Image (spheres, coloured by chain):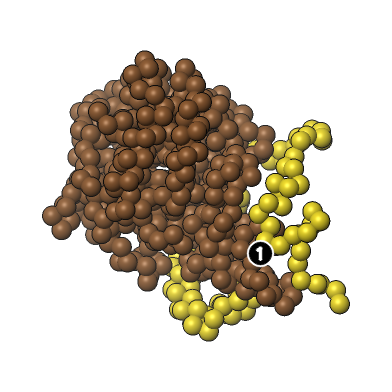
Amino acid sequence: MNPAFENITSLRAKLAARDITPTEVIEALRARCTQVEPSVSAFNHLDWDTALREAATADASLPLGGVPIAIKDVIAVKGQPCTCSSKILKGHTAVYDAGVIERLRSLGAVPVGRCNMDEFAMGSSTENSADGPTRNPWDTSRIPGGSSGGSAACVAAHEAIASLGSDTGGSIRQPAALCGCVGLKPTYGRVSRYGLVAFASSLDQIGPFTKTVRDAATLLGAISGRDPRDCTSLDQPVPDYTASLEQGVKGLRIGVPKEYFIEGMDKDVEQTTRQALDQLAKLGAELVDISLPHTNYALSSYYIIAPAEASANLARFDGVRYGARVPDGKDVLDVYSRTRALGFGNEVKRRIILGTYVLSSGYYDAYYLRAQKVRTLIRKDFEEAWKKCDIIATPTTPTPAFKLGEKTGDPIQMYLSDVFTIAVNMAGLCGLSLPCGFVQRDSTDLPLGLQFIGKAFDEATLLRASHAYEQSTEWHTRRPVL
Amino acid sequence: MNVEYVAKLARIDLSAQEIETYQNQLGSVLEHMDAIASLNLDGIEPTAHASPVFNVLRKDEIKPSLPVEDALSNAPKKANDLILMPKIVE
């Protein structure tokens, strides 16, 4: 088989048995990218020489020895560009490895490629990229989701074995759903964000995109754990997530929140999700009706909190220490204001202005403080729900992938595509999306995702339920025609 | 919201066209935000983040840090191990 079509688990078996070398794997990915990258555009940057050099010295006896992992262009890899798909960081080279990259390297993995994204992770379609949009491998006239659209598309298109992305309000799960791969947002504090360019610090997490649930378990185990350089990463034990995968869902109580199945929702999404729930019931899970009453307020409070934090985090991009700078600034203020005007794209400017506004004197209490109180209510909703169920299942997205350009003129319509994923970040829980079926649009099959939501630091249950469902279906074996 | 004024606070030099566009777009975004205005939030504590840790301290030890040349390698303008900017004080 073409090594590009392998997953981490199958590839590792071949690498360990010396049936294939790490160099041959990189060459296979290069050939695949040459073939399909012109139509997908998943990467901002591909440096095959470095990848080949690192593969040549990769220790195939290590747990991830010789496995290439594609990296979202927001996570620092020493010596590689790190642009966050922004003009303001054009030409910027990372001078250190992120915590997750150190961990991957120590296990023998090789970081390959910089995945396209919405600028500074702000967006749901990867159209807000200074490098141009990424396209959905199932239908290249459609968006791959976002903000980690490149990370999702490269795995779905088999230009990568697996990848890392980041998720602040759905930026891993939503593109995973729309591209038909597995995407996992770990619990807040599970994975170090050292070396992740910050967007909204109380919400951001790094997580894997993979072809199978087992691979997600492997990659999560590889990147998890306390890192003293990210003081929000917690000193919680990291279990072997692959060990409990086969335990099945018999007797598992799966909560089905009524607020995620509302009148007027996309019929195909509803039907596909219901079928997945039936399948879980057949496998022995117990479906429990639950309510998360403040679901409707999650989106509004998120779009106060995330821009507020972003406006503070992005203050560092001022043209002084790194990144672009206007060459003819009259004075310091002129350098700041014109550099930021030229360097940031529309959505980033909108969110910085919105964030500055909700934090400004006279509006802080009405917006930011209220939003933080709503966050408390959202957390309490989940605490109540956990009394009745072990895990929650919902659709990942309200619709399948939409067309490029369809929502770029209307921020609210774009924001609504994250309506099912945001509460997980607000409550700091873990969430996973995996393929649960296909629907036809313009006579093309498009994937949909099922989202599981787990208790804080209970990724093991999330993965176990996902694995049981995945193994009882064939969705994960389908490939887009490119 | 006065977009022109807030953009000044945020140090972004917007064009007249941008001000007009954002004024409209952010107006409707703020209308959407008003969904939470009607909630009764009396006595609810705010949540800043979901992590159960506060005031994480570390030992005050000297450790290797980025070499100066690495730290300055991405600076747009530099000389003598310093970053150059337009003069602030006349």
Q: Is residue B1 left or right of residue A333?
A: left
Residue at the location (48% across, 69% down)? A346
Residue at the location (33% across, 49% down)? A37
Q: Position of residue B74 (x, y in %)?
A: 66, 54
Q: Amino acid at mark 1?
A: Gly
Q: Quadrant of residue A69?
A: top left
Residue at the location (49% across, 57% down)? A85
Q: Nearer the viewer, residue A274 or A398?
A: A398
Name chain B's colour: yellow
Q: Is residue A100 left or right of residue A140?
A: right
Q: Position of residue A441 (x, y in %)?
A: 17, 56
Q: Is residue A341 visible?
A: yes
Q: Is residue A327 above or below residue A223?
A: below
Using the image, name the chain to which the residue with label 1 belongs. A
Q: Is residue A113 above or below residue A353?
A: above
Q: Which residue is mark 1?
A: A319
Q: Is residue A370 left or right of residue A45?
A: right
In the picture, which chain is brown?
A
Q: Judging from the image, what secondary structure is the residue with disc 1 in?
A: loop
Q: Is residue A115 above or below residue A3?
A: below
Q: Is residue A359 left or right of residue A259?
A: right
